[in-house]
Image (tube, rainbow, N blue to C red):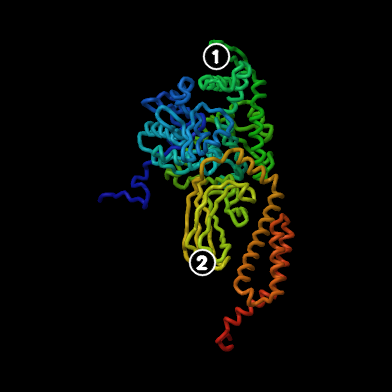
Amino acid sequence: MALLQISEPGQSVAPHQRRLAAGIDLGTTNSLVATVRSGSAVTLPDGEGRHLLPSVVRFGGDAVIVGAEAKAAAVDDPLNTVASAKRLIGRGLDDIERLGNRLPYQFVRTDTAVPRIRTRRGDVSPVEVSAEILKALAARAESVLGGELSGVVVTVPAYFDEAQRQATKDAARLAGLKIFRLLNEPTAAAVAYGLDKNADGVHAIYDLGGGTFDISILRLRRGVFEVLATSGDSALGGDDLDRAVARWIMARVGVEDNASHRLLRRLLRDACAAKEALSTADRVPLHLELPNGVRWEGELDRATFDALVDPLIAKTLVACRRCLRDAGLRPDAVQDVVMVGGSTRVPRIRERVEELFGTPPLVEIDPDRVVAIGAALQADVLAGNKGGDEVLLLDVIPLSLGLETMGGLVEKIIPRNTTIPVARAQEFTTFKDGQTAMVIHVLQGERELVADCRSLVRFELREIPPMMAGAARILVSFEVDADGLLSVTAREQSSGVKAQVEVKPSYGLTDAEIESMLRDATARAGEDLQARRLHEQQVEAERTLAALRAALASDGDALLDATERGLVEDALSKLERIAAGGDAEAIRIAVGDLEKACDFYVERRMNRSIRAAVAGHKVEEFE
């Protein structure tokens, strides 16, 4: 009798075969690809044995070059060689300019929010640059593994906002990759470090890469990672340390800020080399040849370097303290501090982190590879190769999501640091009689007023059945998926009409805006509550005034004599005058006074409605 291979629906007919999957650390300075082979996660080298792929793309006349060869050409061909595209992805041109760093590119303004860089092969966006890096990594993986990838996990900084995450996903799609999910870099590092095999506890992931910084506080409980809080700066990293050294060299040499692109590239290259050398040496010699043929020689010692970078390290520690505060923890509650990112090789950084947390940081694993390894482990799970041995990863959203309500107020639907994926819904209603449409304005931020938060998207719910104000029931649902991407649905309950939007916000949330949102939310909490109370009372006053005006227009002349109408009009005018002011308590009292002044009128209207309802009927009909 022949034997047939039977499989469960949706599973491979050859269950012993593994699906090829990879984890990609799409970094600012360097990128890597890793996979699980023979039960262990390893990074994959190129044909020359190099594991790190410099995140540099050169757009030549007849070819696109990615990696070390492109990096080598950056000094001689700066305008056509794009590095650190991760710092540009998901941002508008105005936001890039506000980063405060002079970039050696020719940016082009377009009709869209996405900036483009002029090269000899045409204008390219940061998304297209990132796609070229992803293509190169995927090609390396398929060459080494000997087959096509079923999917990839791509890592992003935990503090990337909606626009930056969506842009990263677009880059993967443009590269022709099936993306299983976006994974926060600190969470990937925790998996790679094997923290999921430890006893339950709290761990910190300090991730300082070439262009981004993240700090995340994770709790491990019965094999489940939960991100308690996250903070960071998506425009702070090793590149900034290089720039601090480069500015120091420029001051010694007498080079002006308007130096040529080529000289700026050379300065940054030499500054980076000096930084790396000082990780093991106490001093390093410097040699610089200026365009006028003059040679400059100098020396940079460890103490001077530490003084140059201390202000930047201090910024990371501020984010660490804020993250601990958000998690409701003291530094001594953290059991381990994992160092991730090539910049954490700087001894001064390790010293300052140890001072803050009171424990030596974990530095045993190559900080450049740890994120890619964690991504590979998660990709192996999502490809279906791990069966029940899955590590559950619970990330959080970095900023609150909500809606604009009457009076310019923000109603938070999903608070910041909520574990994702998550779905939340809340019911709203109409403000005016006969209202048949509603604008849904989605916002991101911590403040109470719309003006102080970031607008993500607006869309309209139309064809609402005309009803009295407050009668319609509009259910607005928020859903954030595992990649941190948001979709919003609005549905009128009685008719079933609905509108839906996937939030792809215009690029441009700056790091200063992120930081100020969190700082201001704390510093101005009392002020915001007062402002919210004032706006709520003003909305209540407007609602009361609108209802009274509609009633007077309908039956005021029939139910009120001239004296009575004058009393009502006086109370109405008083409320209008007080509502225009800034005293919430006075408005509340005035609303109450108006309601008392109109009690007799409300009673007459109610009696009239009852008489109209019972006219022509016998009492027995209502028993």
What SS does tag 2 mark? Answer: loop
Which residue appears farthest toward the front when viewing the image? 562
Q: Closest to the observer: 588 or 270?
A: 588
> Which percent across, then down, holds residue 622?
57, 85
Q: Which mark is residue 466?
A: 2
Above or below, 572 against 324 in this view is below
Mark 2: which amino acid? Pro
Estimate how packed mark 1 is, as few (under 14), some (14 to 19) or many (20 or more) residues with alpha carbons within 10 Å: few
> Which percent across, then down, holds residue 312?
64, 30
Residue 60's image quarter? top left
Q: Closest to the observer: 410 or 178?
A: 410
**Alpha carbons under labels 1 and 2: distance apart:** 75 Å
Residue bearing the label numbered 1: 290
Left or right, 283 with reference to 165: right
Would residue 158 be visible to someone looking at this image?
Answer: no
At x 28% / y 49%, what residue is drawn? 3
